[in-house]
Image (spheres, rainbow, N blue to C red):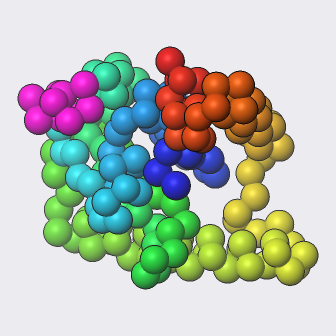
């Protein structure tokens, strides 16, 4: 769901930090793309609109080295496999050609993720859907902590994750 995130791959330090910021802060383009089911294109994180939409994330993302962020949901119909996030170091929109490529990449990634999940369920191999062991363990700790909070506080998982972030 949109309240939970498991980072599968990051291409560099900045993209990993952006994913961590969204998980920690509970706001950002990838979360919005997952919730809305459509692309979220933030071509200038330094502008007033981005600051209003993501008051903490926008400034933190700029500090991390991202001036623009583009998020594309990975979904087929009602099946949502995740979100593909892209960033650039300078502000500016994607060209029509770049946007078309990103949509094709998102569709391809969706199919690969769904296929790898099917293979993993069949025991056919690890596929693209597996996480590095250290990252999987880290996320498992977050899930365990959230589970403990749901029990201790008597709240749902979404509220537990919000409390954990706080």
Vertical placement of 4 versus 120: above or below? above
Quadrant hosting residue 89:
top left
Quadrant hosting residue 62:
top left
Q: Which residue is drawn at 31% across and 22% down?
A: 56
Q: Which of 44 and 123 is in front in this view?
A: 123
Q: Which residue is drawn at 56% across and 79% down?
A: 111
Residue 30 can be seen, yes or no: yes
Q: Is residue 54 magenta?
A: yes
Q: Nearer the viewer, residue 141 or 102?
A: 141
Percent across and percent down for residue 1 are 52, 55
Q: Nearer the viewer, residue 112 or 54?
A: 54
Residue 84 can be seen, yes or no: no
Vertical placement of 6 versus 126: above or below? above
Quadrant hosting residue 144:
top right
Q: Residue at x 39, y 48 (%)?
A: 30
159 left or right, relative to 50:
right
88 left or right, relative to 165:
left
* Boundaries of the magenta span: 45-55
Q: Is residue 47 magenta?
A: yes
Q: Given the current orientation, which residue lies at the most extreme front position?
A: 154
160 left or right, relative to 142:
left
């Amino acid at each position: 769901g949109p309240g939970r995130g498991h980072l599968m791959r990051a291409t560099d330090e900045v993209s990993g930090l952006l994913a961590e910021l969204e998980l920690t802060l509970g706001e950002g383009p990838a979360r919005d793309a997952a919730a809305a089911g459509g692309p979220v294109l933030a071509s200038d994180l330094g502008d007033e609109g981005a600051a209003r939409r993501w008051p903490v994330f926008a400034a933190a993302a700029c500090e991390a080295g991202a001036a623009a962020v583009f998020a594309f949901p990975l979904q087929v119909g009602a099946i949502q496999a995740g979100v593909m996030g892209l960033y650039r170091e300078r502000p500016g929109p994607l060209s029509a050609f770049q946007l078309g490529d990103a949509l094709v990449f998102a569709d391809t990634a969706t199919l690969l993720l769904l296929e790898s999940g099917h293979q993993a369920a069949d025991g056919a191999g690890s596929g693209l859907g597996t996480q590095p062991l250290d990252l999987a363990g880290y996320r498992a700790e977050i899930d365990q902590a959230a589970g403990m909070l749901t029990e201790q506080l008597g709240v749902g998982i979404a509220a537990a994750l919000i409390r954990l972030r706080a």
